[in-house]
Amino acid sequence: MNKFIRVDMTTKQVTIEEVPAKYAGLGGRALTSNFVADEVKPTCHALGKNNKIIFAPGLLSGTTAPNSGRISVGAKSPLTGTIKESNSGGSFSQKMAKAGIKALVIEGMPTDDKFYVIKMDVNGAAIEEAPEEILGGCGNYKAIEVLSAKYGEKVGIALAGPAGEHRLPTANISFKDPEGNMRSAGRGGLGAVLGSKKVKAVVIDDTGAGAVPIADPEKFRAASKVFSKALLDHPVAGQGLAAYGTDVLINILNEAGGLPANNFTSGRIEHNDNISGETLNATITERGGEGKVSHGCHPGCIIRCSQWYPDKDGKYITSGFEYETIWGLGADAGIKDLDEIAYIDRAMDDIGVDSIETAVAVATAMEGGLLPWGDGKAVLDAVKQIAVPTPLGRILGGGTAVVGKVCGLFRTPVVKDQAIPAYDPRPIKGIGLTYATTPMGADHTAGYCISGNILKVGADIDPLKKDGQIEYARAMQIGTAAVDSTGMCLFVYFGIADNPGGYQALIDMINAQYGTELTAADVDKLGESVLKVERAFNKAAGFTNAHDRLPEFFEYEPCAPHNVVWDFTPEEIDEVYNF
């Protein structure tokens, strides 16, 4: 990858540069976070002219390495005010890498009121006015159809939906997947940043691109074979996720007493079978039609945790029907019908909002009296209002922290104004440390301590006790920052955590591609360096250790059935980043 493309939306100029030497050995999150730290003013307004947004493939993206198709997007977040990296599946990352594009940077802000499309190909990039039919509330499904017809059915597409056009802080960036459906860089409101630049979509056409160069193809193939076997041999990565999707976790977390219910008032529900991964599988299988129990979100995915969920007539409703979304609507907001949740999930994809942030905002709105508990039809109507947006739509589109303030609540489950996801930190203490300390705001994917606390993969740590959690949360965040830089899916962790050969194969693939001699220690150093850069940006933006805390109510409201509270001291929490 040898092109570094800058698009200045103020002047409408495109500049193609050689990759700056500092970024030559970086990809994915390592590249986006270093770039944002270097060029974005930490105190700038995230929706103002001084923010910049960057798209970067991972180090292994575009190769035949399995599960290496993640795209990283970085900017200052309008939701949290912190640095932000969000990543997604789809075909965009692989197409960028094959076209030799190391990064796309969008900066500046137009003075006119038009929206634009940025089109990239092997020769560079151009700016064009966006087609009228995809603006003014057009849903993402329709927009992808229009853009695919205009630019080619095989192009990659990154899209700001109606929520992004309105610059709402829950807005995501949606990426076209191989079948023309959607995957999302969901968290942190980066769709609003794209919307603030008046960029409706970015299109990548890799026609004419050759293969990504590999320094040692034979060594790469051998390492890739070992890596694939490590993933497929693991019971979670190779069997469980393909059969039941990420929603397999509903019954597991419910049994563990760590499934947040009714806006984090307890850790268990009684209607778990209604919304479980087992029920998801059975429903898709029974309905047939366009349904698929297992599906890859990008070419080369062998874990295949995604699926197509159909209606009662077998017609497609939504795909990538994730545990966190089903939990947020089904347990946290109390909706008991899986079909109702599926239609809400589709609406969130169509509007272009983070399904975690929006689902938790919905549950918070229920506690605040804005919506009735468990009413799926009312929620669907309210979510659709985000696209207009009505006053209620703007409140929900503002995110969980905004809903809490509007409703006068103190029980608002956020860290750095980002919604806490689908694992209660009181009975699963490791994940609580990740929520509190990650530079990204509450984010389970920043250090997935569920692995060792609940699934017993890579570690075996009692989730109810503090013992070993600080060291584990630290190691998981360091490792995740490194994996996010490779373009790999987070779930490859299951195949390499207990398999030294699988982990070495990942490193061997990088070395074979670039002709390097990296060691496991070098990979750890990369992860550490990324976290330090992100923390330094946040500090310059005004964040201190006092922001690395969970909401106070977790400290004095016990979580049933274990009746435990969040009991880490500030000093203990601060130890996570003592490296």
Image (cartoon, rainbow, N blue to C red):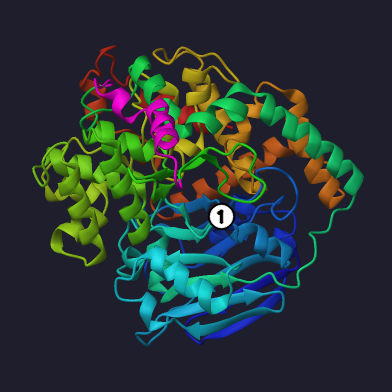
Left or right side of 444 for 417: left
Q: Can you tell which quarter of the image residue 352 is in?
A: bottom left
- The quarter holding residue 120 reads bottom right
Dot 1: within a 10 Å radius of its alpha carbon, few (fewer than 14), some, or many (20 or more) residues?
Answer: many
Q: Residue at x 64, y 71 (%)?
A: 205
Q: Quadrant of the C terminus?
A: top right
**Quadrant including the N terminus:** bottom right
Percent across and percent down for residue 310 are 39, 45
Specify the principal SS of the magenta part: helix
Q: Nearer the viewer, residue 377 or 373?
A: 377
Could you say where residue 358 lies in the image, as x and y percent from the top left?
29, 48
Where's residue 577, x and y in %?
Answer: 52, 33
Task: Please give the residue where the numbered disc 1 appears in the rendered image.
Answer: 90
Q: Is residue 209 magenta?
A: no
For the point 86% across and 37% down, the residue is: 222
Q: Is residue 286 magenta?
A: yes
> Relative to residue 503, is residue 377 depicted above or below?
below
Secondary structure state at the residue bearing disc 1: loop
> Magenta segment range?
267-290
Dot 1 amino acid type: Gly
Q: In the displayed orientation, state which residue is furthest to the left.
A: 369
From the viewer's perspective, is 275 left or right of 282? left
